[in-house]
Image (cartoon, rainbow, N blue to C red):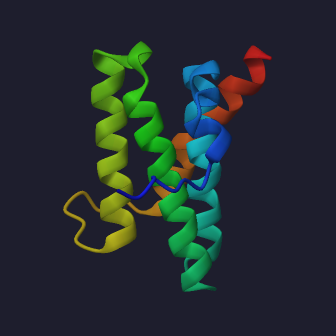
Amino acid sequence: MNAMTYYHTSLAEGRWQTFSFFEQMANIGSEVHRALMWQEKNKGHFDLAIDRALELFDFTLEDPRWRGPKLKELARARELLCYAAFGENPYHTDLADLDKYFFTFAFAARLKR
């Protein structure tokens, strides 16, 4: 059996659970922003940013602190990212929309410091 390979190794080892919800969402937003910046410039960099964002989403979805309404919001945001990144997009949400959404979490995380 192969060991799971992570982009964010220290976060996969438990450090992610030390972050607040706002910090987790802001970090996901950083990867979404990177994907947006690379979308029309470099497919390889774009794909890596999307992969890293999805990994962070998965870490957040696995965080037991976010059960209930937050879990539903997280799952929907991940779904919207997949639609925006991979084509078929019934909601017509793009990466620029998601970048704006995640910016609010970055702002809130900064205020909490």
Q: Position of residue 31 (x, y in %)?
A: 60, 55
| 62 and 104: which is toward the camera | 62
Q: Position of residue 52 (x, y in %)?
A: 54, 56
Question: Is residue 22 visible in the rendered structure shown here?
Answer: yes
Question: Which residue, as the protein is rendered here, is positioned at the far right?
Answer: 113
| 41 and 93: which is toward the camera | 41
Say if 95 sits above or below 104 in the image. Answer: below
Say if 27 sits above or below 99 in the image. Answer: above
Residue depicted at 48% across the width and 62% down the height: 51
| 51 and 95: which is toward the camera | 51
Picture quarter containing residue 14? Answer: top right
Which quadrant of the figure contains the C terminus?
Answer: top right
Q: Position of residue 40 (x, y in %)?
A: 57, 84
Q: Position of 86 compared to 96: left or right?
A: left
Q: Position of residue 74 (x, y in %)?
A: 37, 34
Which quadrant of the figure contains the N terminus?
Answer: bottom left
